[in-house]
Amino acid sequence: MQWFKTRLVPPLGKLSIIALLVTLIVLFTYQGYVIIESPAIIGMISLGILVNILVVFGVTYIVGRVMRLSYEDAAPAAIIAGSNHFEVAIAVAITLFGVTSGAALATVVGVLTEVPFMLILVQLCKATKGSFGRQTQISS
């Protein structure tokens, strides 16, 4: 297990980031013209993604507060729930529909939309940290 953690995982972590960047470059190469020539389509895709992230994040964050979860539990739960995991979406879209498909386009727009919006939600979590009480102990 030690070999796995010290020898295999670190290089694979770097390799996965490089592979994701190469994939995004290829997608932008094939889909860049659509992004530039069809702003209405990009706007509709972005709006849907933003609404989805906001609703799922908001419900999870509020439910965490109602359940009296600690900030340390509620904030990551809401961020993870709100995330669309576009790394997986990119792989699925390309595999099933091809790099020039509308599904691949949606994943490109998703990355451009989700990353800055998630950073805003992280700032929101940090700003509302004080509204969370102490963690409730759950007895077993």
Image (cartoon, grey):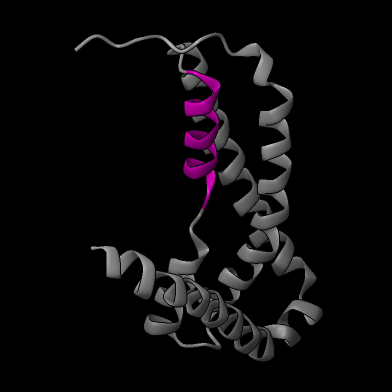
Task: Please say whether residue 44 is one of the residues in the magenta stretch.
Answer: no
Give 81 or 96, whichever is nearer the viewer.
81
Give 92 or 139, whichever is nearer the viewer.
139
Q: Quadrant of residue 41?
A: bottom right
Q: Residue at x 68, y 84 (%)?
A: 28
Q: Main secondary structure of the magenta part?
A: helix
Give 118 or 104, whichever is nearer the viewer.
118
Span highlighted in magenta in the image: 70-83
Does residue 16 appear to the left or right of 120 in the view shown?
A: left
Q: How many marks?
A: 0
The answer to whether 134 is drawn above or below residue 51 in the figure is above
Q: Quadrant of the C terminus?
A: top left
Q: Residue at x 61, y 89 (%)?
A: 26
Rendering coords of residue 51 (x, y %)? 62, 44
Rendering coords of residue 66 (x, y %)? 48, 12
Q: Quadrant of residue 45?
A: bottom right
Rendering coords of residue 55 (x, y %)? 56, 36
Q: Residue lying at the far left in this picture: please name it.
A: 140
Q: Residue at x 49, y 73 (%)?
A: 90
Does residue 133 appear to the left or right of 38 in the view shown?
A: left
Task: Please say whether residue 79 is one of the residues in the magenta stretch.
Answer: yes
The answer to whether 119 is drawn above or below residue 59 in the figure is below
The answer to whether 96 is drawn above or below residue 9 in the figure is below
Rendering coords of residue 77 (x, y %)? 47, 35
Q: Quadrant of the N terminus?
A: bottom left
